[in-house]
């Protein structure tokens, strides 16, 4: 049985990532890319679906940490006979991706054991295993080859590879696993100790560039390191998470593949990176965004692959039972076929913010944006699936219409500020029409609140963004009424639900955890309303939900006190970064997105 979600840490090389449990077991790894088939899939099944454990043979007390501001994980085991540490990391790759595991003796002598079960194709394919003349373990199945080099003698039996060894104080026992193409010669070995120093130097140098929020710098830096590790280096695309199908409700069916890049995350991700001083990463994300959406506006998707791939066909893995029985396990995501009007506002806003920051020439992508707006003018009044990708019937989601307004508003601001050509007067008229439509049809006077969709009585946490995107000021009674209504009806255990799944027909069985990004949005709403004490209390509560190495998943279940959903979640950590800066007051404000130009650039 896999560990609790919050009991995992992760390591990565900015092209893929592995999840490491507290007991020293790697239970999830997709090679060579984030979206490749997993060769360790015990996370969604059992040990027989692939894992690699290194741990003491005797009972141990376990503690762990990342080494400074790096992605190098150190797990410390204390037994009755001594103490040893396991250092796990993935060096930035050259031609091949590697996992390095170093067992270091600290006190006494510690008997250790390792067990390796490789299963390609998400746990389905048993490889052909041989031991080469130099002692290298080699596993091959079709195009895939994995090599394991270690001085420890390995024994393969019953489709497992095992070894026992003892590490004494001052000793180090290395294990180096390498991914390669089966039709090519095995890549040469390298010095794992030197790789550790190079990896440590890279992450420390990268982390030093951060402009952290003063009162919570550790949380901000860890979130930024997480965001960097979830960035696919060759393209700049940022995956929502390195996992698929970790459930939003334990035992439930809300299980999705998040190893993809969503447009809805665009602006908040861009601002988080820029505010922290990572202009290069922000520019890489912007460039990925432009390439992904390039083409015919009618064919714009809400989500793309890490290189901008468009075909993300969803299928179910029948042989994996799912995390703690949460089925089905899905690969791919059929949401790519949906219409979501909010993505047009996200794209326009992200490119506008990039211009403000000077990340690109003012005219960059402008023709594409004009084509976007012409298409949006034709479709903004139609229903869609909304920001949460409901699998029920399309509706006139209020937030979707708000973001359609944002698209035209940002076009006007870009054109007026940077002297770009466009039908500004026409856009002003369209923006006014959309604004009026939302205020008339998306606001419920009886509730004193904006609602999830036109004519409904349901609420939606996305409405917390009305003031931050500049649709209405935070002191508008309608905005304040919306915040109050969300506090009254969507808070569970002090955390914010996206919406009430019992009331909203979203095409799925009801039940999920609190969406953590939405809870950070409530922090931002408190900041805008100058409710500073409440903002700080909620922010600190959210920080307490991080696991022992500072990571957060997509959601948190207040009832079971468990992290749920895909892990670690980029959007959650982006929200943490932005809320931290918002709480600093003197740095970046929550209203940054919607401010007039002279304020947005200060």
Image (cartoon, rainbow, N blue to C red):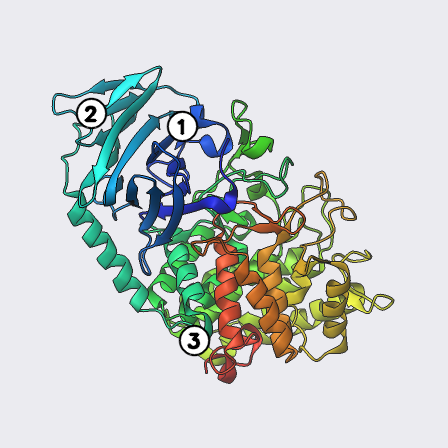
Residue at image mark 3: 214
Q: Secondary structure at mark 2?
A: loop
- SS state under label 3: helix
Task: Please state if 191 lies on the left or on the right of 143 as rendered.
Answer: left
Q: In the picture, residue 143 is in which quadrant?
A: top left
Q: CB of mark 3 within 8 Å of CB of mark 2?
A: no
Query: In the image shown, does 333 or 519 lie closer to the viewer?
Result: 519
Residue 541 at least partly seen: yes
The residue under the point 33% across, 27% down is 116
Q: CA distance from mark 3 to mark 1?
A: 42 Å
Q: Residue 10 location in percent, x, y?
A: 39, 46
User: Residue 490 versus residue 595: which sits nearer the camera?
Assistant: 490
Tell me which corner region of the image, top left, top right, bottom left or bottom right, holds residue 168.
top left
Q: Quadrant of residue 536?
A: bottom right
Other-residue count near label 3 (Cα within 10 Å), few / some / many at <14 / 14–19 / ≥20: few
Q: Nearer the viewer, mark 1 or mark 2?
A: 2
Residue count near mark 2 (Cα–Cα under 10 Å), binned few <14, some 14–19, many ≥20: few
Q: Residue at x 72, y 72 (%)?
A: 479
Q: Position of residue 240 (x, y in %)?
A: 48, 50
Whether residue 286 is visible to the viewer of this picture, yes or no, is no
Residue in front for this viewpoint, 53 or 80: 80
Q: Badge 1 is on which residue?
A: 50
| Relative vertical location of residue 568 with respect to residue 277 in this rendering, above or below | above
Label 3 vs label 2: CA separation? 49 Å
Where is mark 2, residue-wise?
A: 153
């Amino acid at each position: 049985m896999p560990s609790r979600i919050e009991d995992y840490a992760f390591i990565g090389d900015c092209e893929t990532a592995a999840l490491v449990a507290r007991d020293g077991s790697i239970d999830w790894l997709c090679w060579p890319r984030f979206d490749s088939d997993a060769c360790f899939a015990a996370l969604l099944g059992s040990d027989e679906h692939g894992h690699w454990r290194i741990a003491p043979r005797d009972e141990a007390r376990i503690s762990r940490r990342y080494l400074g501001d790096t992605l190098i994980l150190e797990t410390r085991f204390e037994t009755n006979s001594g103490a040893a540490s396991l250092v796990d990391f993935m060096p930035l790759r050259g031609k091949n991706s590697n996992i390095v595991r170093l067992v270091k003796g600290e006190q006494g002598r510690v008997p250790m054991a390792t067990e390796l079960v490789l299963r390609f194709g998400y746990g389905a394919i048993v490889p052909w295993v041989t031991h080469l003349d130099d002692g290298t373990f080699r596993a091959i199945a079709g195009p895939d080859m994995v090599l394991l080099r270690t001085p420890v003698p390995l024994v393969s039996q019953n489709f497992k590879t095992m070894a026992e060894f003892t590490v004494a104080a001052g000793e180090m026992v290395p294990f180096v696993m390498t991914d390669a193409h089966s039709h090519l010669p095995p890549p040469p070995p390298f010095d794992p100790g030197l790789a550790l120093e190079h990896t440590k130097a890279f992450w420390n140098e990268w982390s030093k560039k951060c402009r952290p929020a003063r009162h919570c710098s550790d949380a901000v830096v860890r979130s930024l390191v997480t965001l960097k590790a979830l960035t696919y280096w060759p393209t700049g695309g940022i995956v929502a998470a390195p996992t698929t199908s970790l459930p939003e409700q334990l035992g439930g069916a809300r299980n999705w593949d998040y190893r993809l890049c969503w447009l809805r995350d665009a602006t908040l991700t861009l601002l988080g990176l820029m505010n922290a001083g990572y202009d290069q990463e922000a520019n890489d994300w912007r460039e990925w965004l432009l390439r992904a959406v390039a083409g015919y506006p009618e064919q714009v998707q809400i989500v793309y692959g890490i290189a901008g791939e468009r075909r993300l066909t969803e299928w179910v893995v029948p042989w994996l039972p799912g995390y703690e029985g949460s089925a089905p396990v899905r690969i791919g995501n059929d949401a790519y076929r949906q219409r979501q009007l909010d993505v047009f506002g996200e794209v326009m806003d992200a490119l506008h913010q990039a211009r403000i920051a000077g990340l690109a020439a003012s005219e960059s992508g402008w023709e594409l944006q004009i084509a976007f707006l012409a298409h949006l003018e034709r479709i903004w009044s139609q229903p869609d699936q909304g920001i949460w990708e409901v699998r029920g019937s399309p509706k006139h989601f209020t937030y979707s219409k708000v973001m359609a307004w944002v698209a035209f508003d940002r076009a006007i601001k870009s054109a007026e500020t940077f002297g770009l050509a466009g039908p500004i007067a026409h856009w002003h008229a369209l923006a006014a029409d959309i604004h009026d439509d939302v205020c008339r049809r998306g606001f419920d006077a009886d509730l004193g609140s904006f609602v999830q969709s036109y004519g409904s009585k349901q609420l939606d946490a996305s409405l917390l963004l009305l003031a931050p995107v500049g649709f209405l000021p935070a002191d508008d009674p309608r905005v304040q009424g919306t915040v109050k209504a969300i506090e009254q009806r969507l808070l569970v255990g002090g955390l914010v639900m996206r919406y009430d799944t019992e009331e909203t027909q979203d095409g799925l069985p009801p039940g999920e955890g609190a969406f953590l990004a939405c809870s950070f949005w409530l922090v931002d709403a408190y900041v805008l309303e100058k409710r500073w004490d409440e903002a700080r209390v909620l922010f600190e509560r959210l920080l307490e939900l991080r696991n022992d190495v500072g990571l957060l998943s997509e959601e948190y279940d207040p009832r079971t006190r468990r992290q749920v959903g895909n892990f670690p979640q980029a959007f959650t950590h982006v929200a943490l970064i932005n809320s931290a800066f918002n709480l600093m007051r003197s740095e970046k404000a929550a209203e940054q997105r919607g401010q007039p130009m002279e304020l947005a650039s200060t």
